Amino acid sequence: MVNTEYTEVLVRYGELSTKGKNRGVFINRLAHNMIDVLSDLPVKVTANRDHAHVILNGADYNVVAERLRKVFGLQNFSPSLKIDANLEVLKETVVALFNNIYLPNMTFKIQARRADHSFELDSMQINQVLGDLIFDNFDYAKVQMKFPDITLRVEVRSEEIFLSYETIRGAGGLPVGTAGRGHLMLSGGIDSPVAGYLALKRGVEIEAVHFASPPYTSPGALKKAKDLAGKLTVFGGSIQFIEVPFTEVQEEIRDKVPQTYLMTLTRRFMLRIVDKIRELREGKVIINGESLGQVASQTLGSMEVINAVTNTPIIRPVVTMDKLEIIELAERIDTFNLSILPFEDCCTIFAPPNPKTNPKLNKAEFYEQKLDVEGLVERAVREIKIELISGDRENLEVASNEFANFL
């Protein structure tokens, strides 16, 4: 009996085809990311300049496909069957495959590619031989070159042939980590996880920075933020979660600053602390979930005053989106239901009833003279806690998967 079970997944790259001399760096990073998201499965990942293979080794294809579908840098992938590079084995296997997938009056196309020129037939001959085979074995079969019901891809290599007939669209974008490291200001709300997702899509490796203010914020609020970070790991691998103790800073601001400027100074301190962490951990940018005009601290006037504490680039991926657009994307990446859990956030615990929507820089700087700015920032950074977040997967130990290195 001919085996028609999937043996591996053929992965095709997206934008990586445009990367020229840097292509190898991008491919290696993509391979590492695939290894990370599949690390608890018995798969093996190999990669070369043209494509990658995920050898299933008995793993459930549906589980592998669901994870690969979310990894940035993948254009598409196809579950494949590997057989010996033998014409008779190829013909037997094609008939067995069509017995599983063909229905009367379906159209089909054979798309052969012969990488091994020592194989007895060239690509056109393979197409003709297999096409005739389908006609001989299946009634009413019709060839159709554009948009057929079944496209059977046949890739002939030096010692094996790969057969596939499905193509699953990948996430596109760039492999996480190829654009450098950024620090995401991750609250427990809807917007910041979406901002993190969009940064990941463009290849930014994110470290999540979360401000906790116990006893005003609870362990449940902290766990919620970690769970949100875990949701983002499916797009490119594990994430460093950085917890910042923020109670002292917030109490100082509450006790010494007029209520109307409380939010402005709170955000300025957050930005200073994140920027210091970014510097220590060799990040290039700060990322946040600000959406223009959504709250008092996200008007252009507020952003200008808050940003004045740093020269580091700040990426705001959702800045022009309205709330419904952000919610739609949050639902798609499976963070929305977590984000709306009713836990307190450090940005809201001391929120004044009438915050300044157009604060003045000179006033913000005047009020900060009452505070030990450098000391508060230094102590908060010194006491951060860092934890590796790996999503829902329990086993992060990467097996000894091997893939090509490109020099």
Image (cartoon, helix red, strand yellow):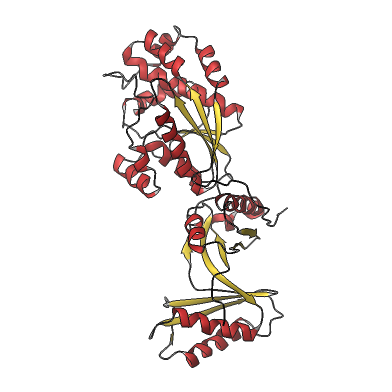
Residue closer to the observer: 93 or 256: 93
> 348 above or below 90?
above
Dividing the image into 4 quarters, which one contains the N terminus?
Answer: bottom right
Q: Residue 338 placed where, x, y %?
A: 37, 40
> 77 above or below 181?
below
Residue closer to the observer: 208 or 75: 208
Outermost residue, top direction?
A: 370
Residue 257 image-quadrant placement: top left
Going 54% across and 53% down the picture, which residue do you hit? 73
Total labels drawn: 0
Q: Residue 332 placed where, x, y %?
A: 37, 50
Going 42% across and 28% down the picture, which residue do you hit? 219
Describe residue 283's horizontal placement relative to residue 135 as left or right.
right
Q: Residue 36 placed where, x, y %?
A: 58, 49
Q: Residue 167 placed where, x, y %?
A: 48, 67
Outermost residue, bottom direction?
A: 136
